[in-house]
Image: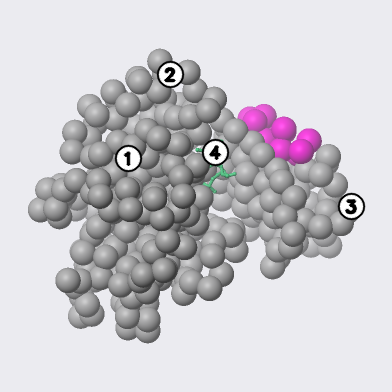
Amino acid sequence: MGVKVDIVAGFLGAGKTTLINKLVPAYTKKEKVVLIENEFGEIGIDGDLLSGALPTREIYAGCICCTLAGNFIEAIEEMNQQFHPDRIVIEPSGVGQLSDVMRACQGVKGTAQLDLNHLITIVDGTGFKDDLDAFGAFYLDQIRYANILLLSHLAQVEQQEIDQVISELKTRNGHAVILVDDWRDMENEDLADLLEAVRPQGPDRIPKPEPPVHHDHHHLPADRIFSVWGQRNPTVTTMQQLNSALERLGDTAYGQIWRAKGMVELAEGGWAYFDYTPGHCSSRPMDSAKEAKIAVIGCQLNRERLGEIFPAQDHGEKSK
Ligand SMILES: Nc1nc2c(ncn2[C@@H]2O[C@H](COP(=O)(O)OP(=O)(O)OP(=O)(O)O)[C@@H](O)[C@H]2O)c(=O)[nH]1
């Protein structure tokens, strides 16, 4: 048997890091596990949030379709040689295509055989229709190639709407198992066992991804091409200032923001972590962080205005 490869995909803010943080502690009781993280942009946040003891490699991709495959193949080969894992868990960027990552895994040669195992896509129940309308085929790729579909953020969604999302998912992907339970409430081991038990298809049933299409950014319309803005060492802020900055992110004067996340140091002491997507926004205190940093992903971002609400501490040229 080869090395199991689990890919945890899902659009921006769907819950990939949350799921990995539940599965990894369960896996590591029995197996040697390594993690590969792909962030869109150069300021990585997820690596700081993920289980510290695990061998982790972060890959920063500016343009998924063009730079992803080579970096991934190299990272997988290196992690394999260095750690000889039983399982590789991959978190692609929320704006990555699952088929691109699958293709990259199929391109790995020379080391242990890789078995594509869980191909999980988490679908945010609140954002489903908007994300589908905005990103079409690009978004559907994550749904189409999954063998397990998990739903998230369901508390805010009416049952009728959940049923519609499920029926739409079944139409788009007839072979995947769809889990509608609130997986965040499950014990880590129970969730890991459940995923192991429901894995529906052997690799022969996984559709072969089509060859890569270069430089057209997956036919995204021009106003839907993602860019990223980040700030290292943002100004120390109060929780109240942070929350009022987050409220402004829905204003298109800042661009169309699909995701913002980061950790900031608080004037009142301690740190805060925040998450933003158009559907939900939260901030919470955290004990400590390695570094204060903010990452924003969206389309037609207004960098200057973002720099006004999240200024750098020394007002230097730190934004990317
Ligand atoms: N209410 C609710 N919150 C959730 C759920 N899943 C994740 N979250 C929260 O949503 C936020 C985003 O979750 P992440 O796990 O960081 O999402 P991600 O897919 O890794 O996001 P990216 O950084 O864009 O790749 C976090 O604050 C989570 O705690 C869910 O099912 N319900």
Q: Residue 243: percent from the left, percent from the top?
A: 76, 38
- Residues packed near mark 1 inside 10 Å, few (<14), some (14 to 19) or many (20 plus): many
How far apart are the alpha carbons under marks 3 and 4?
29 Å
Q: Which residue is mark 2?
A: 159
Extent of the magenta region = 243-255
Q: Secondary structure at mark 3?
A: loop
Q: Residue 204: percent from the left, percent from the top?
A: 10, 53
Name the residue type under label 1: Leu
Task: Say if 146 sits above or below 41 in the image.
Answer: above
Task: Say if 86 sits above or below 81 in the image.
Answer: above
Q: Secondary structure at mark 4?
A: strand
Name the residue type under label 4: Trp
Q: Would you say 103 lies left or right of 58 here?
A: left
Q: Mark 1 vs ligand 1: CB under 8 Å?
A: no
Q: Which residue is mark 1?
A: 149
Name the residue type under label 3: Glu
Q: Secondary structure at mark 2?
A: helix
How far apart are the alpha carbons under marks 3 and 1?
41 Å
Q: Which residue is mark 3?
A: 268
Quarter of the N terminus within the rendering: bottom left
Task: Say if 124 sits above or below 162 in the image.
Answer: below
Please identify the dominant SS of the magenta region: helix
The residue lying at 83 percent from left, 41 percent from top is 241
Q: Which residue lies most toward the right here?
A: 268
